[in-house]
Image: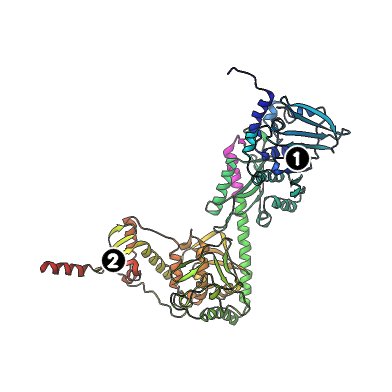
Amino acid sequence: MPIRRLSVQLANQIAAGEVVERPSSVVKELLENAVDAKATKIVCDLKNSGKSLIRVRDNGQGISHEELPLALAPHATSKIATLEDLEAILTLGFRGEALASIAAVSKLTLTSRTKDEDHAYSVEVEGPQQNPEINPAAHPVGTSVEVCELFFNTPARRRFLRSDRTEFMHIREIFVRTALANPDIDFELNLDGKNVINVKAVMGDEKKRLVRLSKLAGSDFNRSGIFVKGEDPCLNVNGVLLPPSSVEESAVENIFLFLNGRPIADKVLTHALKQAYSEVAGRPCPVRCVLYLTCDPHEVDINVHPRKDEVRFHEARLVHDVLLETVVNSLRKALRDTDDLLKEDAENEKTLLEDKTHSDEDNSLNQFLKDIKSVPSLKSGSSYKSGGSDQSSFVTSNHDSLSSTANRGGINYSPHYIQMPSSKDGVKENLRRYDYQIAADNARSRAGIYDVKRVDLTSPKAAKLLSLPAPDVLFIMQENRYFLVKASVLNRELVSRDYMAKVKLGTVEVYALSMPFVLKAQKPLINAIKACPEALARAGFTLNLKKESIEFLKIPVLLQGVDLAGILVKALPLAAASAKNLSMGICPKQLADMFAAAKKSVVYYKDEAQLLVDKISDPEILESLGSDAFELNIARWARELGGAGNA
């Protein structure tokens, strides 16, 4: 095929492929032009999610009728004139490609009027040569751009468009980012005649700016946003952060970044934000923020991609470190302030608790225990079924979703949800209403309400590891007795007994949480814990009791890194039921077993197995494992074999 010059229409359509990918690309370019025109109000109307019509109207400076033919010409712009202008761009648009590219794949009409003109003019382009036609029109000061039948002349592109809902969500995201970037402009978005977004401009008032921001980015920013402000010769940072999400909170990453008024998506800045949140929270967690960054325009190159949302910093490492330090300092300061408020609330709660009479405290705890004991005993193997529609939450984690109910060891429970009725007659049927249902026999025998068996750890008996015949299986000899033992079960038993011993001595190691862990609770449980606050302190917990929630500030090291929501909703009722025993250093075996089972450990190597066996100090430990420790009667087998040989 010989070399030939492409037609104007074909060349424009090829160029349009880089700029106009879908309806949201058109909306983005038209919104940026309206902002650059110094508009104070921008309205966007859509039909069929932009497939049939996209109309963007503004009250900006307008375009004089002499310049209208150039407005739709390729590589024609009023934003830059020289190479020096390209090195310090402050406008959103500068390429001069947007309107020409849009006109190449749609039916476009541009109507505009300046304040010095008596009436408006409109320009349309159609046909292979894209010749502009200018006609007088009625229009207020400003500009309107109508884009009809997008991709009507490129059917292949039109077939690749997604559903109306998907295309609208892309448009909405572009619209929200542009509105967030320009708080001094009114924005309105209408879809098929219905208003979707309508936010007014705010000037200076920080509270109103936050309310406007929350309408666009989410109510969490108004409810728990943390203001961040940092000034550096390299980069100035201003905006709002949301605190790192708790372990049980299901949060979606939501990052809005604006550089010199331009919405951007930069890998360097995103990495700095993720590193900052991980450093403060002590674990990876989703970033949620709206940040406005400013820097010298000569220090950043925005001419990287036709979409203009990618940038390249000349001092990328320095910018990364400045943003990282600013965000870390802001989050830590906010958390310290929160801790101070928590301590103040704790002091207030403590004062109120001390004002109550001792008899009232005893009555509260005794009533809680009495109500548990008053539930009729069930036969072994029976189950309580949670009934009635009047159930209300007793303890719930902040996670909204409920896990499926499981049945383990005679206890039916839903790991993230506990229920009981909130009747005025007290808590007479507490356990009957638990989705985490503790049968009365379990409550008596396991929670240690009646008889508490003290564990004797004072008679050491040496055990010897003979071999590791299979992963997590130990062959142990102790006092001429031989056992095959499941290592993970043995480890759980040893950890459980160790925890019970430390509770008895008051030496439980604790771990300070970087952020308070919150469980919602109702009055019966909170009152029971208030009546004997030293019980959970002895167990390794430091907490604040609120009206409807419990905030954990410190937890036993044993629970570090585990699913706190799943453990605490099961453990708190047991701890409350045996509060007096705990306060005296007597830990219920069931509670210790719950904590010990939180971390599952499987033994694969002999050195790990040896360390585990060295901790065995009592032959009763192996016997207590039941079916998980099988005793081999080697002496009897030897006698039988010897007897057969003698015969």
Q: Can residue 563 be seen by looking at this rendering? A: yes
- Look at 62% across and 71% down and name the residue there: 349
State the image coordinates of residue 88 (x, y, percent, origin top left).
68, 32
Quadrant of residue 296 in the image? Answer: top right
Q: With respect to residue 480, does 131 lie above or below?
A: above
Q: Is residue 327 magenta?
A: yes
Q: CA distance from mark 2 to mark 1?
A: 81 Å
Quadrant of residue 419 in the image? Answer: bottom right
Image quadrant occupied by the C terminus? bottom left
Quadrant of residue 140 in the image? Answer: top right
Query: Which of the two residues, 64 or 260, is positioned nearer the viewer here?
Result: 64
Asked which secondary structure carries label 2, the reply is strand
Query: Which of the two residues, 348 or 161, is positioned nearer the viewer here?
Result: 161
State the image coordinates of residue 468 (x, y, percent, origin top left).
29, 58
Type of the residue with mark 1: Arg
Image quadrant occupied by the N terminus? top right
Q: Of all residues shown, which one is farthest toward the left?
A: 647
Task: Please state if 616 lies on the left or on the right of 315 as rendered.
Answer: left
Query: Which of the two residues, 342 or 547, is positioned nearer the viewer here?
Result: 547
The span picked out in magenta is 311-328
Query: Which of the two residues, 451 or 353, is positioned nearer the viewer here?
Result: 451
Q: Of all residues shown, which one is farthest toward the top?
A: 2
- Look at 36% across and 72% down and name the residue there: 457
Task: Please state if 457 lies on the left or on the right of 220 as rendered.
Answer: left
Secondary structure character of the magenta stretch overall: helix
Counting residues from the start of the chain, the first of labels 2 and 1 encountered is 1
| Residue at numbered disc 2 | 483
| Residue at numbered disc 1 | 55
Badge 1 crowding class, 10 Å Cα cut-off, few under 14, some 14 to 19, many 20 or more, is many
Q: Of all residues shown, which one is farthest toward the right?
A: 118
State the image coordinates of residue 89 (x, y, percent, origin top left).
69, 33
